[in-house]
Amino acid sequence: MNLPSPKRSFGQNYLVNPSAIEQIVQEALQSSAPEILEIGPGRGALTQALLQDGRSVHAIEMDPEHRQYLETTFQSVKHFKVHQGDALSLPIPSRGPFTVVGNLPYNAATAILTRFLLEDIPWDRLVFMFQKEVGDKLLGEASEKSYGPLSILLQLCADAHVLLQLKAGSFWPVPKIDSVVLSIQPRRPSLTLTERQHLLDWLYISFAHRRKTLRNNWHGQRDEALFMKALAAQGLSDQVRAESLSPGIWAQLVHPRHL
């Protein structure tokens, strides 16, 4: 079968840096999870290396041409299965728990990460590729320009660090941006799934106008009084801005019984 070509519509940029592939696989396999979930396998460079470990590998591929290529290439491997669909909505194909690896399409990367943070998916480690600017935002700290809703949600739910920084030349076709690989492990105990969604909803409201105070951003919202009370209980003024509060303070605001 002929090699499939990358498609811009699917945001496909193949990772072609052998050293990066090796380091990503090594990081993923440090997890003790019995199964591996790969998102966006493309032509299977990471897939082939992951399969050497012997664990079951489930690959989610949106492009039917790449799905067929992977099925043909790895047809003799019994512990591999490719599932065609969108990683944002496709039901997770097994019980897990998983270590999850993804050279994620830039245009869907944060949405895919958010799914793993908000849904009841049993994962032990995420090793995800992001646009460098997005990676900076995810690891942003309070009062930094990069700090925002996903920084806070991620840092409350998980421990994350930069595994690799990759120049555009590590990919083909060569993108116009650099990339970063983050290794993410769940933090236990953490917020419940309901609390996470509630927090994220309020973070988007609170950061809607970064230069406005929380009082102004919260004005007229349904739970305004509850959040104002929780803020006062932390000894904080309603004139503060969202970007000045640490993730820990945000956790207290969304979960007042911890006060």
Image (cartoon, rainbow, N blue to C red):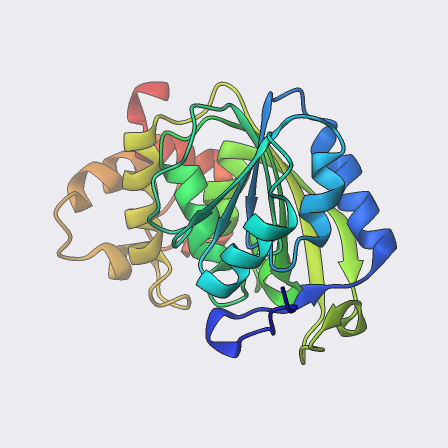
Quadrant, the C terminus: top left
Across and down, in percent, residue 177 comes to 68, 75
Nearer to me, 89 or 155: 89
Across and down, in percent, residue 133 comes to 62, 66
Q: Quadrant of residue 169?
A: bottom right
Residue furthest right as drawn:
19
Nearer to me, 188 or 108: 108
Q: Quadrant of residue 173?
A: bottom right
Residue at (36%, 46%) from the top-left corner? Answer: 237
Residue at (58%, 69%) from the top-left corner? Answer: 12
| Number of numbered labels in the structure image | 0
Residue at (49%, 24%) from the top-left corner? Answer: 96
**Residue 147 seen in render:** no
Q: Is residue 18 left or right of residue 77?
A: right
Quadrant, the N terminus: bottom right
Across and down, in percent, residue 230 comes to 29, 34
Q: Is residue 124 left or right of residue 253?
A: right
Residue at (45%, 51%) from the top-left corner? Answer: 112
**Residue 151 seen in render:** yes
Q: Is residue 114 left or right of residue 101?
A: left
